[in-house]
Amino acid sequence: MDASATPGRGRLVLYSQPIVPLGDGKAKRELLLRMNRASGNVILPGSFLPVAEKYGLIGEIDPGSSPRRSGSQPRDAGWK
């Protein structure tokens, strides 16, 4: 992970995905954390979280440093 990819650089993004029960239950949403590359490609957490753990940066990724804390709204994940 290069220094420009650290959470403080604003590259973490929350996506919102609907969770729809099969019965009459009320639909809910889950939040999915992603990281954007400078190229615009999305990096899934299975790729960046282990690297953050390995290099001692995992403490930088917490609710206090999340995009939501900064006032931005989660993006719709776009899955149907």
Image (cartoon, grey):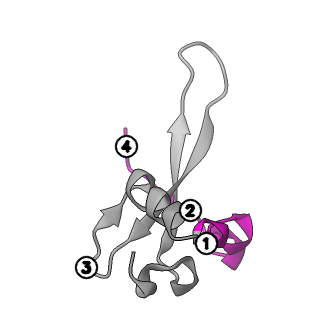
- Give the CA distance from mark 2 to mark 4: 14 Å
- The numbered mark, 4 or 3, whose residue comes first in the sequence reads 3
Q: Give the residue type at disc 3.
A: Ser
Nearer the observer, disc 4 or disc 1?
1
Q: Where is mark 2, residue-wise?
A: 74
On-image quarter of the C terminus: top left
- The numbered mark, 1 or 2, whose residue comes first in the sequence reads 1
Q: Are marks 1 and 2 in contact (CB under 8 Å)?
A: yes
Q: Secondary structure at mark 3?
A: loop
- Give the CA distance from mark 4 to mark 1: 21 Å
Q: Are marks 4 and 1 in contact (CB under 8 Å)?
A: no
**Residue 77 badge:** none
Q: Where is mark 1, residue-wise?
A: 67
- The numbered mark, 1 or 3, whose residue comes first in the sequence reads 3
Q: Are marks 1 and 3 in contact (CB under 8 Å)?
A: no
On-image quarter of the N terminus: bottom left
- The numbered mark, 4 or 1, whose residue comes first in the sequence reads 1
**For this view, does 12 lie left or right of residue 1?**
right
Which image quadrant for residue 70? bottom right
Q: Secondary structure at mark 4?
A: loop
Residue situated furthest top in the rendering: 23
Residue that appears at 54% across and 61% down: 53
**For this view, does 25 lie left or right of residue 13?**
right
Q: Give the residue type at disc 4.
A: Trp
Q: Where is mark 3, residue-wise?
A: 39
**For this view, does 44 lie left or right of residue 64?**
left
- Give the CA distance from mark 1 to mark 2: 8 Å
Q: Give the residue type at disc 2.
A: Pro
Q: Which region of the structure is painted magenta?
A: 58-80
- Give the CA distance from mark 1 to mark 3: 19 Å
Q: Are marks 2 and 4 in contact (CB under 8 Å)?
A: no
